[in-house]
Image (cartoon, rainbow, N blue to C red):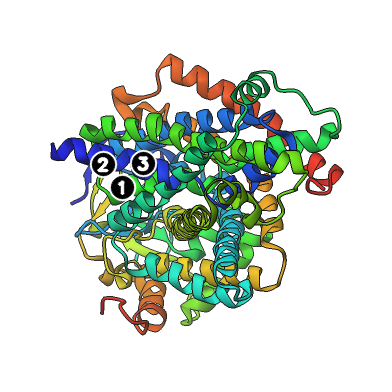
C-alpha cells in the first residue's frame, strides 16, 4: 500500500512538474493562433523527453551518479565544458523566465506591478533551494501543480469542437492566413519547451538526491513513461482551451493572463483563480528546479559536493552557484525586458542546444562500464538516435528562423 | 598503500577527470593532472637514465585544470588559480599517492577527509565567508 502510494505520488509529481512557463506561453500562443495544428510538436517533444529522461534516470539508478557527472569522464574536459557552460547560460535564462512568469501571475492576482514582485519571488525561490528538503519540495510543488487539471475540465465545459481539434491534430497544416516560417518557429519553440535542458539535469540529479538504486528502476520508468506523457497532455490542454475561446475572437496571447482566459470564460472568477494559482505553482517550482539544476551542472562538472541532503555549508560552492544564478536571473528580469520575450528566447535557444544536452545522455546510457547489463537496448537506441537526428535538424534551423521571424512576430 | 582495481590502464581510463572522494564519501574535486617523479632522487639533483619516473601525486585545482582547457580561457583560468593561491607558488594542488586509498572504475577514494587536503582552500573560503554567514546555513 505504502509502495503504491509512493508510486502514485511519484507519477503525480512528474505530471505536476512537467509544465513550466515555457509550456504555458508557447501552448497559449500556438493554440490561439494555429489551433491544434502544432499539437504534433508537443507530442514529439514529450516522447523525446520521456525517452531521454528514462536513459538519464537509469544512469542515476544503476551507476549511482547523475548523467552529467559521467559526461566529463566520458567526453573529456573540453566538450563537457561546452556542455556545462551552455546549460548554465540556458538555465539562467530559464530561471529569469520562470521568475518573471511568477511575478506576472502575482501582478494579475494583486495589481501590484510585476517588477516589485521579482525580488520577492527570487528570494522565495532561493529559500526553497537553500533549505527545503528535496522530496518535500518536489512533492508539495508537484502535487499543487496538478491544479492545472482545471484546463482539462474547462475543455469539457467549453463548447469544444472535438472533431475539429482531432482533425487539426492528426492533419497538421499551416493555417491559410499564417506565414510558414512563423508556424515552424513556434513548432520549434514547443519542442524546446518540452526539452529544456534543466529538466534532464534535474531529473537525474534528483534521482541521486532520492537515492535511487536498481530496485527503483520501475518507479523511475513509471515517472517517465506515465508522468511525462500526462504532463504533455496538460500542455496540450493549455493549447486546446485557447481554440474555442481565443481563436474565434482573434485574441493573440502575449501575456500569461491571456493563457488563463479560457478557464475564466468557462468557470468565471473561481476558474481564473485556480488557473492563475496553477501557473503560479508551475512557474515557481520551475524557478527553484532550474536554479538547482545550474548548481548541479557546475558542481558535477568540477567534482564538488552538491545536493540538498546536507546543510548548505556542506555543499558551499554548489549553494554559491545557486545563489549567483538566482541573482543573475532576477537581474535579467529587472532590466524590464518582457518576461514573455525571455521565455520565447530561452525555449528557442534551448531547442538549438538540444543535441548538445541530449547527445551525452545517449552516449553514457550505452556505456557498459557504468551500466553493465542495463545499457540501452536496440529499441531505445533506435528511438534515441532517430529523435536525436530530428533534434539536430531542429537545432540547425532554429537560429535562422529566430532571425527570419523576429522571434515569432 | 593504494589499492588499484586494474593492473594495466591508461591515465584517461582511470585517472584524468575522475571524481575524488574523501574518506567519508564526500566529493573532493576531479583529477586534472598527474605528477611523476624519480623514485630515488639523486642528492646531486641530476636525473638518472636507469630509473623511470613513477606516479607520486594526483594534481587538481585551477592551476592543473587551466592547461587542459587550453586557449586563452585556460591560461586565464590557471592565472586566476595562481592569484588565488596567494603564496606565489605556481605548482598545482598535490594529492600525494600516500593519501589515495583505492582507484577503480567509479572513483578515486582518498584516505583522509577533504578538509585536510591542500585543494580545500577555495571551498573553505566560500563556505566560511559567503555561505556560513547566511541564516540557516547549517553552521
Residue name at image x 42 percent, y 26 percent = A366
Question: Considering the image in quadrants, where does the N terminus of chain A appear?
Answer: top left
Cα distance between the residues tagged 3 and 1: 23 Å
Position of residue A374 measured from the top left corner of the image (x, y, whole percent): 32, 25
Q: Is residue A190 above or below residue A208?
A: above
Do the residues under discs 3 and 1 have CB atoms within 8 angstroms?
no
**Tags 2 and 3 touching, CB below 8 Å:** no
Nearer mark to the viewer, of 2 and 3: 2
Q: Which residue is mark 1?
A: A208
Which residue is nearer to you in this view: A56 or A126?
A126
- In the displayed structure image, the side of residue A344 where residue A406 appears, left or right: right
- The residue under label 3 is B14
Q: Residues within 10 Å of mark 3 (few under 14, many from 20)?
A: many
Q: Nearer the viewer, mark 3 or mark 1?
A: 1
Q: Horizontal and vertical percent for residue A26?
A: 65, 44
Residue B40 visible in the displayed image: no
What is the C-alpha distance between the residues marked 2 and 1? 6 Å
Residue A100 vertical position relative to residue A166 in the rendered view, above or below: below
Label 1 crowd (10 A; few <14 / some 14-19 / many >=20): many
For this orientation, the residue located farthest to the left is A1
Residue A383 point in image, percent of width and height: 51, 20
Labels 2, 3: one chain: no
Q: Is residue A278 left or right of residue A406?
A: left
How would you rate the neighbour count of disc 2 (Cα within 10 Å): few for under 14, some for 14-19, many for 20 or more? many
Mark 2 vs 1: CB contact within 8 A: yes
Which residue is the extreme one toward the top? A378
* Residue designated by label 2: A212
Amino acid at each position: 500500500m505504502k509502495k503504491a502510494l509512493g508510486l502514485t505520488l511519484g507519477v503525480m509529481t512528474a505530471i505536476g512538474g512537467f509544465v513550466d512557463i515555457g509550456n504555458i506561453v508557447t501552448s497559449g500562443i500556438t493554440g490561439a493562433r494555429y489551433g491544434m495544428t502544432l499539437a504534433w510538436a508537443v507530442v514529439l517533444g514529450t516522447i523525446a523527453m520521456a525517452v531521454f529522461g528514462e536513459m538519464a534516470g537509469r544512469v542515476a539508478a544503476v551507476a549511482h551518479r547523475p548523467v552529467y557527472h559521467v559526461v566529463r569522464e566520458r567526453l573529456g574536459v573540453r566538450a563537457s565544458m561546452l556542455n556545462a557552460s551552455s546549460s548554465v547560460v540556458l538555465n539562467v535564462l530559464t530561471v529569469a523566465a520562470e521568475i518573471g512568469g511568477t511575478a506576472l501571475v502575482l501582478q494579475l492576482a494583486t495589481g501590484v506591478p510585476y517588477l516589485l514582485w521579482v525580488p520577492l519571488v527570487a528570494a522565495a525561490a532561493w529559500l526553497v533551494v537553500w533549505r527545503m528538503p528535496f522530496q518535500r519540495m518536489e512533492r508539495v510543488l508537484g502535487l499543487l501543480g496538478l491544479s492545472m487539471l482545471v484546463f482539462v475540465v474547462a475543455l469539457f465545459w467549453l463548447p469544444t469542437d472535438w472533431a475539429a481539434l482531432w482533425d487539426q491534430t492528426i492533419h497538421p497544416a499551416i493555417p491559410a492566413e499564417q506565414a510558414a516560417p512563423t508556424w515552424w518557429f513556434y513548432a520549434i519553440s514547443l519542442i524546446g519547451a518540452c526539452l529544456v535542458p534543466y529538466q534532464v539535469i534535474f531529473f537525474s540529479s534528483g534521482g541521486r538526491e532520492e537515492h535511487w538504486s536498481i530496485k527503483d528502476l520501475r518507479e523511475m520508468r513509471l515517472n517517465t513513461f506515465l508522468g511525462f506523457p500526462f504532463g504533455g497532455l496538460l500542455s496540450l490542454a493549455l493549447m486546446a482551451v485557447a481554440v474555442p475561446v481565443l481563436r474565434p475572437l482573434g485574441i493573440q496571447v502575449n501575456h500569461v493572463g491571456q493563457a488563463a482566459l479560457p478557464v475564466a470564460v468557462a468557470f468565471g472568477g473561481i476558474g481564473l483563480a485556480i488557473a492563475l494559482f496553477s501557473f503560479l505553482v508551475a512557474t515557481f517550482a520551475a524557478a527553484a528546479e532550474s536554479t538547482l539544476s545550474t548548481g548541479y551542472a557546475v558542481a558535477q562538472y568540477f567534482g564538488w559536493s552538491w545536493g540538498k541532503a546536507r546543510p548548505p555549508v556542506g555543499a558551499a560552492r554548489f549553494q554559491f552557484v545557486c545563489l549567483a544564478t538566482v541573482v543573475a536571473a532576477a537581474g535579467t528580469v529587472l532590466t524590464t525586458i518582457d518576461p514573455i520575450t525571455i521565455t520565447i528566447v530561452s525555449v528557442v535557444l534551448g531547442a538549438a542546444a538540444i543535441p548538445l544536452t541530449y547527445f551525452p545522455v545517449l552516449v553514457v546510457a550505452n556505456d557498459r562500464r557504468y551500466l553493465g547489463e542495463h545499457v540501452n537496448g536496440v529499441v531505445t537506441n533506435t528511438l534515441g538516435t532517430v529523435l536525436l537526428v530530428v533534434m539536430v535538424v531542429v537545432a540547425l534551423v532554429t537560429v535562422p528562423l529566430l532571425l527570419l521571424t523576429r522571434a515569432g512576430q | 598503500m593504494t589499492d588499484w582495481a586494474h593492473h594495466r590502464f591508461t591515465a584517461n581510463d582511470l585517472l584524468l577527470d575522475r571524481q575524488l572522494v574523501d574518506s567519508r564519501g564526500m566529493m573532493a574535486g576531479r583529477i586534472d593532472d598527474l605528477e611523476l617523479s624519480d623514485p630515488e632522487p639523486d642528492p646531486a639533483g641530476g636525473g638518472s637514465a636507469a630509473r623511470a619516473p613513477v606516479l607520486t601525486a594526483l594534481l587538481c585545482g585551477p592551476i592543473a585544470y587551466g592547461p587542459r582547457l587550453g586557449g586563452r580561457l585556460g591560461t586565464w583560468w590557471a592565472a586566476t588559480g595562481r592569484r588565488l593561491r596567494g603564496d606565489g607558488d605556481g605548482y598545482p594542488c598535490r594529492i600525494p599517492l600516500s593519501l589515495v586509498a583505492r582507484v577503480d572504475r567509479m572513483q578515486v577514494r582518498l584516505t583522509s577527509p577533504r578538509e585536510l587536503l591542500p585543494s580545500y582552500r577555495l571551498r573553505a573560503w566560500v563556505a566560511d565567508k559567503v555561505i556560513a554567514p547566511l541564516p540557516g546555513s547549517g553552521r
